[in-house]
């Protein structure tokens, strides 16, 4: 988990995992057993991720790796874990490469993959802005490139004429202000913003400062109200479009929802310092429920083989924090647990969902 460094906002995911496991253990554990979750800092650095993963496997002798965050950081350990037949379970990255049971049978994600998400945005642009001039800002790694490819695939033959600028940035940059100024100069009227939370907030702020007002689409991993929209200034974030598969804690429509009430009780007792409007907290809480489901299905057979077998045998699992209609499904050939999303627009100080829940299945 990135508990330090430029993406440390996402460390909330790991703290939510730990808090949820503490709750489960206090309630008696799973099938009479307690879970021991060891969570280490990799600072979103691939070499550090490799070092910490080896420590977990070789020194701590863990049963499996769960929920690690980041595309580059999971990529660097994927071969090692698969060669050692250690499950790499429900990792926090939507890269489409995780949907590959044939070549990497020990690796499975959870969230909708980035390629699918970008195709859904492309469909929206095609329907609502058929003559768009699109500028893309993306992180220069697998994470960013996956979104860019999804957008191009979704636009089809029109991609070459519609995309007028592709600008990449490095996570080591202190700021992306110059990238935003450069993109404004292209006169694009649609901006696809593929960043991580710190840079997403910078982009929104800078666009307001230089008065660039395209239709702004932001990827859902950087749509947190707590770590992106609020720091960027709500007045600067109006009408941005994104997508979700999780219930938004700031949306009043869920105030009497049983799932949201359970989440609030969890926060109050086990993670009181957690930022309720940070979607990373809700995400961590959701993924931890997937972990518990797999352990329940394992019964008394907790071999690595059976853990992976059960992770690839989830049928219509409804998790209380997912949007209505969004279900978790896996199979031996289906390593894409969640493949549904709903579009949303930022209004006032919250996201408003619109349209139907869209399924964008992209198999491996």
Image (cartoon, rainbow, N blue to C red):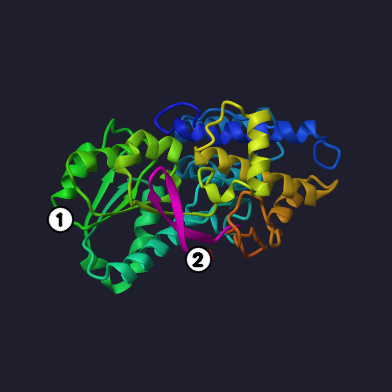
At x 63% / y 33%, what residue is drawn?
Answer: 267
Total tally of numbered discs in the picture: 2
Q: Which residue is mark 1?
A: 187
- Determine whether, in the image, residue 276 is placed left or right of residue 351: right
At x 71% / y 62%, what residue is drawn?
Answer: 315
Q: Which residue is mark 2?
A: 358
Does any portion of residue 35 appear in the rendered image? no
At x 47% / y 45%, what residue is drawn?
Answer: 71
What segment is highlighted magenta in the picture? Answer: 337-356
Question: Is residue 246 shown above or below 59?
Answer: below
Which residue is nearer to you in this view: 285 or 53?
A: 285
Which residue is nearer to you in this view: 50 or 150?
A: 150
What is the chief secondary structure element of the magenta stretch?
strand
Q: Quadrant of residue 179?
A: top left
Whether the residues at callouts 1 and 2 have beta carbons within 8 Å, the answer is no
Say whether residue 93 is magenta. Answer: no
Question: Is residue 2 shown above or below 334?
Answer: above
User: Residue 313's x, y, as percent?
Assistant: 71, 59
The answer for how far apart the CA atoms under marks 1 and 2 are is 31 Å
Does any portion of residue 172 appear in the rendered image? yes
Q: Earlier in the sequence, mark 1 or mark 2?
A: 1
User: Residue 340's x, y, as percent?
Assistant: 54, 61
Label 2: few (<14), some or many (≥20) within 10 Å? some
Which residue is nearer to you in this view: 207 or 142?
A: 207
Residue 32, numbered label? none
User: Residue 156's x, y, as percent?
Assistant: 33, 71
Q: Secondary structure at mark 2?
A: strand
User: Residue 112's x, y, as percent?
Assistant: 52, 56
Say whether residue 340 is magenta. Answer: yes
- Residue placed farthest to the bottom in the image? 157
Question: Is residue 333 shown above or below 286?
Answer: below
């Amino acid at each position: 988990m990135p508990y330090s460094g430029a993406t440390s906002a996402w460390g909330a995911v790991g703290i939510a995992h730990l808090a949820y496991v503490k709750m489960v253990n206090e309630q008696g554990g799973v099938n009479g057993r307690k879970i021991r979750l060891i969570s280490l800092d990799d600072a979103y650095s691939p070499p550090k991720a490799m070092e910490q993963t080896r420590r977990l496997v070789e020194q701590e002798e863990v049963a499996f790796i769960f929920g690690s965050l980041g595309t580059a950081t999971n990529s660097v350990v994927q071969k090692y874990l698969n060669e050692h037949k250690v499950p790499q379970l429900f990792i926090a990255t939507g890269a489409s490469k995780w949907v590959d049971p044939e070549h990497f049978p020990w690796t499975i994600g959870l969230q909708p993959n980035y390629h699918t998400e970008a195709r859904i945005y492309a469909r929206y642009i095609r329907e609502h802005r058929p003559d768009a001039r699109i500028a893309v800002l993306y992180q220069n790694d697998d994470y960013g490139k996956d979104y860019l490819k999804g957008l191009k695939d979704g636009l089809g033959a029109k991609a070459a004429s519609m995309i007028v600028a592709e600008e990449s940035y490095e996570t080591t940059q202190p700021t992306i202000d110059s990238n935003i100024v450069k993109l404004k100069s292209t006169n694009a009227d649609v901006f696809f913003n593929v960043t991580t939370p710190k840079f997403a907030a910078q982009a929104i702020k800078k666009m307001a400062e230089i008065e660039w007002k395209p239709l702004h689409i932001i990827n859902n991993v950087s749509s947190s109200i707590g770590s992106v929209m609020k720091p960027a200034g709500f007045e600067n974030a109006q009408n941005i479009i994104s997508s979700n598969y999780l219930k938004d804690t700031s949306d009043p429509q869920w105030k009497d929802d049983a799932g949201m009430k359970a989440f609030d009780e969890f926060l109050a007792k086990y993670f009181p310092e957690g930022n309720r409007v940070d979607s990373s907290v809700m995400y961590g809480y959701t993924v931890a429920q997937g972990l518990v489901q797999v352990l329940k299905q394992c019964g008394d057979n907790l071999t690595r083989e059976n853990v992976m077998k059960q992770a690839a045998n989830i049928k219509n699992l409804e998790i209380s924090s997912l949007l209505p209609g969004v279900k978790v499904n896996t199979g031996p050939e289906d390593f894409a647990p969640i493949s549904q999303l709903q579009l949303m627009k930022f209004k006032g100080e919250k996201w408003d969902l619109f349209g139907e829940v869209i399924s964008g299945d992209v198999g491996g």
